[in-house]
Structures are given as structure tokens and as C-alpha cells.
Amino acid sequence: MFPINIVGRDRAVPKATIVIIAVNLLVFLWELSVDAKGDGYLKSALQNYGLEVCKIGEQSFATTSLDTFRSLFLHASAAHALGNMWFLFLFGGLVERYLGSLKYVAAYLGFGAAATVAHVLLGNTVCTVSDTGLVIGASGAIAGIMGGFLALKPNAKVRTMLGFFRPFVWTIKLPAVVFLGYWLLMDALQFLGWVGVETDVAHWAHIGGFLTGVLTIFVAGFVKPLPKPDPLEHLAE
């Protein structure tokens, strides 16, 4: 399932979300320029600037924190980067409008940090000479944004594409609680190895980030009321 848009999505310009997307894409363009230099250059750069789980404890806390921050803006491929940015664009606006731009950016970085901690503690990283557990990508932080969206607007309709090849393509509108709940469930099942094939995806980072996002908005709701449902939202196509 792939989200196309959100019915009735806030039309206000999500400035912080756009800035975060722009930074990620600029960093990815830099990655492409490094990759163009030849084999091994990009891998070396990612190891230098990303977080290597197996080196935690061997380096200072400040270095680990900096690597964690930088890893949130690095991606392994164009599909990885563009897919992440699309999800952030769809789900980030509502969370930004609720928190305010500055708090939203802080929350985004916090979700990324929480996602990384979840992966380090629960991701079952196996350290070898050739594999030091490199962690890169904005997925954990964006999962937190998605969790925040769910807490804010569980009944929002997500127009979703099923299938990718005509004529086997359908679009349906799913409540956010169904779409995002399915997304979280599939991540958990993939981590357990019950569906899909073995990959290098940091599933616990996704799960940890998502749950942190839900909890953050739940707590924030005691300070600032959550947005009320719009009875005319179905008319905003």
C-alpha cells in the first residue's frame, strides 16, 4: 500500500517540513556527487558520517550524538530518500501546525534519537569485521511524525494505492488508524521474519520512533487541546 494524499489535508504551507525535506535532498545530492568519484567513496563517507552501532562505547558520547544527528540526513538510495520525503510531506504538516515549527523540528530530531536508541537496544545487530552496524536514514524520525499524526487525527482519510501495475491498480480511502496501523504491523512482522525477505531495514527504529510520536502527542494533549474533527472534511477532495 502506498499513500497518494490525505483527504482534507491542511492547506497551510508546512515551512519546517519543507526545510527538512530540502536539507535531506541536498545531502542526498552530495551523496550522489561522492558516489560519482568511484567505488568505495560513498561507503567510506557513510561510515565516516553515519552511526555505526558496533562503535558505540568505543567513542565519546559527543561523537556518538553527532553521528546520530548526521545519520538522520543520510540515505542509502534514491528510493530510500524520495520515499521517506514523500511520507514526511504527507504526514508532517498536521503535526507541525499542532506543535509549531520550532517544537516540530525539536520533536523530529527527538523522534530520530529515540528511534536510534530503540534500534541499538533491540535491533539485534551482529558485529563483524566487515559489518559495523551502520545506521542511516530519516525513517525513524518520520515514523515518529506518522505516530504523531495518528494521535492527532486517527480518522483522517488516506487515499491509498494498491498495486503498482495497470490494470492491477486500485485506490481506496482508508482511515489513518487503519493505514498507519497496517504499516506498523507489517514492520513488526518483518522484524520477526514472518513476512517478506530478510533486509537491512532497522525495523525497531521505525517501531520505536512511531511509538515515541504517539506518546509525545498524547502528553502534549494535556497542555494543548487536540484538533477537533472537521465534519465537512470529506468534501475537501
Image (cartoon, rainbow, N blue to C red):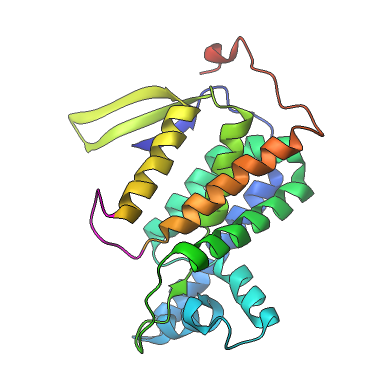
Residue 56 in percent (x, y) is at: 56, 80
What residue lies at 55% left-to-right and 26% top-to-bottom?
Answer: 154
Nearest the viewer among 118 and 81 is 118
| Quadrant of the drawing holding the N terminus | top left
| Above or below 51: residue 140 | above
Residue at the far left: name it. 167
Q: Which of 115 and 8 is in front in this view?
A: 115
Write the residue at 56% across / 41% down.
147
Residue 146 colored in magenta in the image: no
Would you say 181 lies left or right of 191 here?
right
Is any atom of residue 18 visible in this view? Answer: yes
Residue 3: x %, y % from top left:
42, 35
The picture places residue 107, in percent across and down from the top left corner, at 69, 51
* 235 to 217, vertically: above or below: above
Residue interval drawn in magenta:
193-200
Q: Residue at x 53, y 58 (%)?
A: 138
Residue 92 x, y percent position in the rendering: 60, 42
Residue 124 picture quarter: bottom left
In the image, residue 168 above or below residue 116: above
Q: In this view, does 132 lie above or below 95?
A: below
Number of numbered labels in the structure image: 0
Determine the residue positioned at 33% across, 25% down. Answer: 171
Toward the right, the furthest residue is 223
Magenta span: predominant SS is loop
Q: Is residue 196 magenta?
A: yes
* Residue 14 visible from this viewpoint: no
Asked whether 29 or 53 is in front, the reply is 53
